[in-house]
Image (cartoon, rainbow, N blue to C red):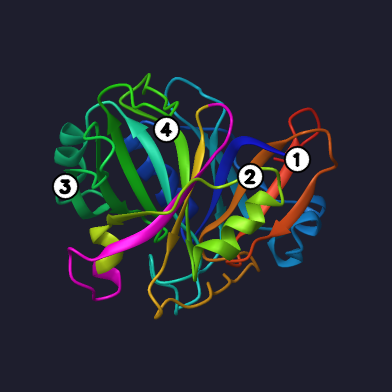
């Protein structure tokens, strides 16, 4: 059974620039730069990644959930929010309006694609988020939660920009992708409809278009969101090192089963391993 999110991997064409972007603008701390190595690349089924440079980033307070950066060139066809697979990483923040002021500056390495707004959910008005595209073409949802929300165990940011807590999956249809996670011991919730303006903009749909989505609850205040993408979405292209472009894979802690890779129904890569014996 999947237990919780461990982290997300992003393939970036310029490792040093992306490290600086997360450090200088989001306060993330960088570990040592290493190479992927043959063992890890073989485990992923991406032997071309063995010599790629790699680093793990953590929030200012040192929470264990990571953002892993690996250097590689994206396929020229890659476009944010245009492909099936991991569409966005959602990070908890303390003050999204202040963060928007910072990231909206002319020299920011993050491009704002959605200004702060209360999310379009019938069950709460306590979630306000903005959306940006980072230097690797990765989409981040930067989210402030202003109070308790019945039915959800959401984290609070201990620093200005806290850890990852939701991964958003873009799928051709919800049922098949939800089945991937049901097979891993995690059933999805009910299907909802909501405006997701950045997704509509990426697919030339009206801003008030309502997209189908569902959520999958994990442990340790972590979740998955599955969005049904418009028909024009395409399979995610690979990068030069054989990993999916952009938000490449998501790492999960699991029970006592052996470490393994899983490819989901939307083509998303999952790196699954017990906490006591993981290759992360």
Q: Tell me if mark 3 has few (under 14), some (14-19) or many (20+) residues whose alpha carbon lies within 10 angstroms of its own.
A: some
In the rendered view, would you say 77 is above or below 227?
A: below
Q: Where is mark 4, residue-wise?
A: 28
In the rendered view, would you say 130 is above or below 262?
A: above
Q: Tell me if mark 1 has few (under 14), some (14-19) or many (20+) residues whose alpha carbon lies within 10 angstroms of its own.
A: many
Q: Residue at x 57, y 40 (%)?
A: 7
| Magenta residue span | 201-220
- The earlier-in-sequence mark between 1 and 4 is 4
> Can the viewer see residue 47 in this picture?
yes
Q: Quadrant of residue 259?
A: top right
Q: Quadrant of residue 48?
A: bottom right
Q: Residue at x 36, y 49 (%)?
A: 140
> Which of the pair 204/124 is nearer the observer?
124
The spot of residue 10 in percent (x, y) is: 52, 53
> Which of the pair 49/140 is nearer the observer?
140
Q: Which dot marks residue 273?
A: 1
Q: Which dot marks residue 104?
A: 3
> Which of the pair 107/87 is nearer the observer?
87
Q: Where is mark 2, residue-wise?
A: 251
The spot of residue 25 in percent (x, y) is: 30, 38
- Kind of element beneath mark 1: strand
- The earlier-in-sequence mark between 1 and 3 is 3
Query: Real-space Cα distance between discs 1 and 4?
Result: 24 Å
Contact (CB < 8 A) between labels 1 and 2? yes
Q: Nearer the viewer, mark 1 or mark 4?
A: 1
């Amino acid at each position: 059974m999947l237990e919780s999110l461990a982290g997300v991997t992003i393939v970036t064409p310029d490792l040093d620039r992306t490290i600086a972007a997360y450090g200088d603008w989001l306060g993330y701390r960088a570990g040592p730069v290493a190479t992927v190595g043959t063992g890890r690349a073989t485990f992923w089924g991406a032997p071309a990644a063995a010599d790629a440079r790699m680093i793990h980033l953590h929030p200012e307070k040192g929470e264990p959930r990571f953002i892993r950066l690996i250097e590689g060139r994206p396929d020229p066809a890659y476009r944010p929010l245009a492909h099936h697979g991991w569409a966005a990483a959602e990070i908890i923040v303390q003050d999204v309006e202040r963060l928007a002021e910072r990231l909206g500056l002319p020299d920011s390495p993050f491009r704002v694609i959605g200004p702060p707004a209360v999310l379009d959910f019938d069950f709460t008005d306590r979630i306000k988020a903005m959306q940006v595209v980072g230097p690797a073409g990765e989409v981040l949802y930067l989210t402030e939660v202003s109070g308790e929300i019945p039915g959800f165990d959401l984290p609070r940011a201990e620093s200005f920009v806290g850890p990852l807590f939701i991964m958003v999956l873009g799928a051709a249809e919800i049922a098949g992708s939800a089945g991937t996670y049901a097979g891993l011991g995690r059933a999805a919730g009910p299907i909802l409809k909501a405006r997701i303006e950045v997704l509509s903009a990426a697919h030339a749909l009206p801003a008030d278009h309502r997209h189908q989505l569902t959520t999958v609850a994990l442990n340790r205040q972590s979740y998955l969101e599955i969005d049904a993408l418009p028909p024009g979405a395409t399979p995610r292209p690979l990068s030069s090192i054989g990993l999916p472009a952009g938000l490449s894979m998501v790492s999960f802690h699991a029970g006592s089963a052996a470490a393994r890779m899983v490819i989901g129904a939307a083509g998303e890569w999952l790196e699954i391993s017990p906490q006591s014996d993981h290759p992360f």
